[in-house]
Image (cartoon, rainbow, N blue to C red):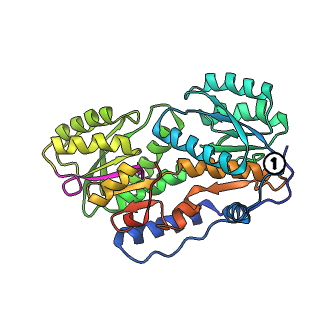
Amino acid sequence: MIHRLFRFKCTPLIAKAMMILGVAFMALAGAPLQAAEPSPAVKALIAYEKSGAMPSKKYRIGYLTECVDNPYCLARLAGLKAAAAKYGFEFKIFDANFSPASQAKVVQDAVTEGFDGYLFGPAAAQPGCGLYNRLIKPTGKPVVSIDIAMCGDADYTAGTAATLHMQGPLHFNEALEHAFATCKGKCKAAAVGGFVGSDLFTYWENAIKKAAAKYPNVTVVVDEPANFDPRIALKKIQDALLAHPDITMVVSSWDDMSRGVEQAVVAAGKVPGKDVMIFSGGATKVGVAKVKAGTWAMSTAYLPYEESYYGALALLMALEGKPINAHIDEALLPKVLDSTGTIFITKANVDKYKPNY
């Protein structure tokens, strides 16, 4: 399927986790940051971008996406449009609207229509793996997967030209451990996550369990889905604070939900950032502003714009006979390394981070 001109050996996950988490601790403490090093895969990607190389022809790309109509997915679409404008390729959207069943249909349509390559965001990991192996891979065209890892892989899915994601188990584990590590003495925590049954919710739940086991001084008294909706998060945390008025920490996997969390804290007569620490995910413009104001303790950066922009670039490299064939950890992209050096945006480094969505 892909000319394997070279293959990069991915950094071991444990070593990478220790490196990024160590950088994050220093950021929270206000200590000088030790710059993280990009992986060989990221170095190759950025070197290709900086070379100014342009595609030898106008390629047609099938964008097999799980969504296009929420803030995260709209930011990712913007990144793809920017790449298309810069590199002169065309793309067509095949939107699954978060449904694995719908994705099976639109992937079949895309393969039938035929494209030079595919940028694939699975609606769910295992069904996506099946679609990749059954429909996309047999086309012999290069594929870059984004958003979540497929086929039970922790990072890179073999056979793809590259795998990019930012919300995998490793990143959620780091974020939750980072939040729980800030607890001094004993703390009670509440958590809100996405949709029950989704891969992201499963990753989030497993990360909460791991962090709680590592930091037994933190007791998670409420753990609820909130469907990425601030209104649901408001209701869930209002109920949590009524049942457990001594909650001092709330962890949320998305900045929109965290807005509802903050409202619930205020409604309970407490001061967010003082009485209750809020740890969020996204580092959106709203989230970064909240961290800067001291209302939230942290927001973990997600990079949807860069995910599609560099995903498209990795696909073009494969189409030009220079595939990366490796995991591209978005935490090691210039957006992070050239600003804060860590995906954890806190009061100590918030002025260095400029969100683009």
Q: Secondary structure at mark 1?
A: helix
Query: Is residue 82 toward the left or the right of residue 250 in the image?
Result: right
Query: Is residue 340 toward the left or the right of residue 224 in the image?
Result: right
Quarter containing the N terminus? top right
Q: Quadrant of residue 146?
A: top right
Q: Is residue 248 above or below residue 62?
A: below
Q: Measuring 45% from the left and 51% from the top, which residue is drawn there?
A: 210
Q: Which residue is mark 1?
A: 319
Q: Is residue 92 visible?
A: yes
Report x, y in % for residue 280. 37, 50
Query: Is residue 95 toward the left or the right of residue 184 in the image?
Result: right
Q: Measuring 26% from the left and 39% from the top, which residue is drawn there?
A: 237
- Type of amino acid under label 1: Leu
Residue 242 highlighted magenta (yes or no): no
Residue 282 highlighted magenta (yes or no): yes
Q: Measuring 25% from the left and 45% from the top, which residue is drawn there?
A: 262
Q: Is residue 132 above or below residue 357?
A: above
Q: Quadrant of residue 331?
A: bottom right
Report x, y in % for residue 299. 39, 54
Query: Is residue 313 toward the left or the right of residue 354 in the image?
Result: right
Report x, y in % for residue 30. 35, 73
Residue range corresponding to the magenta coloring:
271-284
Total count of labels: 1
Q: Is residue 215 visible?
A: no
Q: Is residue 159 above or below residue 43?
A: above
Q: Measuring 47% from the left and 60% from the top, which residue is drawn there?
A: 343
Decide: few, some or many residues near mark 1? Use Cα within 10 Å; few <14, some 14-19, many ≥20.
many
Report x, y in % for residue 50. 69, 65
